[in-house]
Image (tube, grey):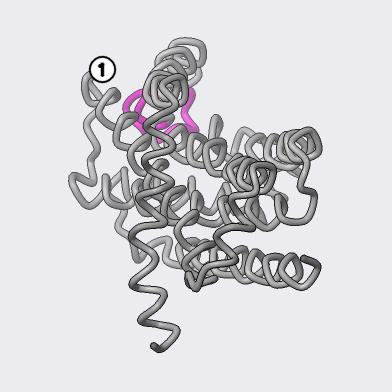
Amino acid sequence: MSRLLRFARDLGPLYLREVRYSLRIRAYLVMSIVQPILWLILFGQLFGAVGRLPEFEDATYLAFLTPGLAVMTASWSSAYAGMGVIRDLDRGIFDRLLATPVSRTALIGARGLHSATVVMLQALIILGTAFALGVRPPGGLEGVAAVLAAAALLGAAFGGASTGLALVVRKEETMLALTNFLVLPLLFLSSLLITRELMPEWMARMAAFNPVDWAVTFGRAGFRGQGWSAYGTELLLLALFAATCWILAGRSFARFRRRE
């Protein structure tokens, strides 16, 4: 059987395994739903007055914030995807799977697909909550699709990076420390909460090289109805970043297998 057929055959069951495990953890399920809603309400109320500044193009700060929070949720959720890898390593599940003829590519790819699914669902929750609070995307369904695409791509990228990192460090404490150290600066060095025009000049320049800002910029442009083509560069960079993260995750997996 060709590698492609083995990958297609094994991807579904491995993906469903990740989904079933997530559904069994009730605290994770509840937090995945409640946390995005809390962030939208709290941040929207806290910084609501900022939206009246002339640098903001949106009708309200909540409308400005909605695509950014969808991306922020994607970053946080997928950045901890590697914790599942460490869980399987500690329980010996990874070794048992490697002893079977399961596709090695599907073993890693299922985790990326699961990360993308989770962040898209959370993005839909944020968009639905924003709609209930009176936000209407000028971009209509195309704008909603842009936010979902940005969240899914960034979620897949961070999920790949997290998976590769977990295969290298193999310890929960180290993984948690590195994740917080890497993700927080990326979030705050982006236009997630504030426009680039109001950021310090050095931060605005750094944001141009930040994948989180690429996702925020593209998602927000689509949400505003500016069209995907207007920010196609950000979409292309985001897709390349996601591909690079999974290539590196694959190499980490290959090194892990050689050491075992």
Residue at 18 percent across and 47 percent down: it is 141
Pick the residue in front: 77 or 172: 172
> Is 61 within the magenta?
yes
Residue 220 image point, x, y percent: 40, 44
Q: From the image, give the main secondary structure of the stretch colored magenta.
A: loop
Quadrant assignment for the C terminus: bottom right
Residue at 45 percent across and 63 percent down: it is 235
Residue 59 picture quarter: top left
Q: Secondary structure at mark 1?
A: loop
Q: Which residues are magenta?
A: 53-64
39 sits to left or right of 227: right
Residue 122 image point, x, y percent: 37, 34
Residue at 39 percent across and 20 percent down: it is 30
Quadrant assignment for the N terminus: bottom left
Regarding residue 52, the answer to whether it shows in the image is no
- Amino acid found under the numbered disc labelled 1: Leu
Residue 195 image point, x, y percent: 54, 36
Q: Is residue 54 above or below residue 142?
A: above
Q: Is residue 53 above or below residue 241?
A: above
